[in-house]
Image (cartoon, rainbow, N blue to C red):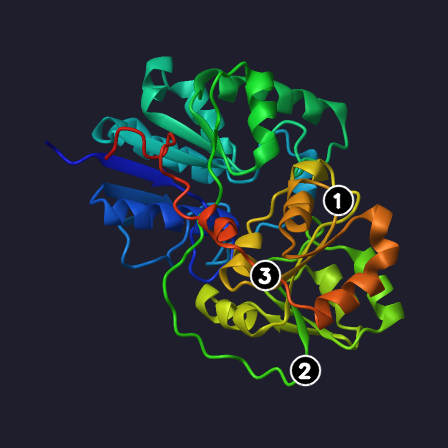
Amino acid sequence: MDKKQVLVISYYLYPFYNYGGGRRFLSLLKLFDSNKIDYLVITSSEKTFLDHKTLFIKDPFIRGKSVDRGNSFLRSFNPLPDSMFLWSYEVFKYLKKHKKNFDRIIVSAPPFSLPLILSLFLKRTDFDKFILDVRDIYYDGTLRDYKIPLIRFTDYIFDRIIFKKFRKITTNIPRYVDLIKKRYKLKRVDLVMNSLDDEEQQLEKVNFKEKVILYSGKLDRFRFNKDFFEIFEKITPPIKIFIVGKVDKKIKNYLEKKSFVKLFGEMDYKETQKYVFSSDIFLIMHPFNLKDGQSIFSSKLLDGIKFKKKILYVGPKNDLYDFIKSNKIGEAISKSDVSDLEQKLKRLIENEYYYNDSIVERFKQPFKNSYFTENLF
């Protein structure tokens, strides 16, 4: 029997950037490797993992080698799904020629430009082999901040065009499953949580010389909770906040004035893991008023679980909030109980929190028995 051929398309797939979307697919590729599935990855970065079969397609919109596209202005006023439209068109040209060579084609979204272009120019029968992995909702989702009605209207139209063609959908957000089923009249949507990388690693501890709350990854307006820092400054607990990752300029200027915060800048994922491993508490946060905040289930949780860290979540009530509280692996703080921050921090610092095996097992190899792997092995 001939080997199955899989094409995986992920705009973000970088060793240098600690982005959940890219790391999600790296776990999938490890599964393909272990089951001897042939695959090709299309991404937008030259600096990618050399041990994976990768096709680099440069984004014409990007100058140099930067992958930072944090301009929220484009999200508010751009009638197109995103600013990756030129890159998506280049990928489409490749797919038009080579799609017949693959048994399965997995497309990560966002960006939604590629799904839109494919939906406009490919036949419905072509989509039997396509899977759309939805990590954020397009129409009226968290990343869309509508300033004018026209943009909302075009989003609605483009969104319907995409999901009229793409009918095999996966997502890593529990609340998206019912939303997608209802909105697009689908009987099946697969919930596939991000996979826990459980490889044995020998990590050296970083000597912090003090108790540390660690935040890792990108810190922007979708992931920053200013209320938390304002209250933290007033109560002055005996612990510092260390941040590893890229921080937006305005947030960076604000944090640099705080004596209890230390910014370490960007690190590759391997180096970041050392800081998570060495920390006392792992921080996950979002603004209390984040749009569609009840649907957030941060992939950062896996970093805390991997090293069995005490978790501090600050943000809107959602499945992540409930997960942390019900499994008693840390403290979760919403707007309604932010006044309890001092008490909860004291509890986190002084007490031990324990992980049972079921928490860890839930996130091991979740790709099995899903559209990702169905009939491949």
Residue under circle 2? 210
Q: Is residue 169 above or below residue 323?
A: above
Which residue is pictured at 42% across the width and 33% down the height?
89
Mark 1, residue position: 316
Q: CA distance from mark 2 to mark 3?
A: 22 Å
- Looking at the rendered structure, the kind of residue marked 3 is Tyr
Mark toward the start of the polypeptide (2 vs 3): 2
Disc 1 + disc 3, Cβ < 8 Å: no
- x, y percentage for residue 169? 46, 27
Residue drawn at 36 percent across, 26 percent down: 130
Query: What secondary structure is marked by label 3?
Result: loop
Q: Specify whether residue 62 is in view.
A: no
Considering only vertical position in the picture, is 239 above or below 161? below
- Badge 2: few (under 14), some or many (20 or more) residues near its Cα, within 10 Å? few
The quarter in which the C terminus is drawn is top left
Q: Residues within 10 Å of mark 3 (few under 14, many from 20)?
A: few
Q: Secondary structure at mark 2?
A: loop
Find disc 3 in the rendering and name its residue. Answer: 354
Furthest residue toward left: 1
Q: Can you tell which quarter of the image residue 125 is in?
A: top left
Residue 348 visible from this viewpoint: yes
Q: Left or right of 66: which side holds 7?
A: left
How many residues crowd around disc 1 within 10 Å: few (fewer than 14), some, or many (20 or more)? many
Query: Is 214 positioned to the left or the right of 339 in the image?
Result: left
| Callout 2–callout 3 Cβ contact below 8 Å | no
> Which residue is located at x 23 percent, y 26 percent?
100
Label 2, label 1: how many angstroms apart (C-alpha)? 29 Å
Quadrant where the N terminus lies?
top left
Residue 39, percent across and down?
A: 26, 42
Q: Amino acid at mark 1?
A: Pro
Residue 298's mark?
Answer: none
Instruction: Report x, y in % for residue 248.
Output: 68, 59
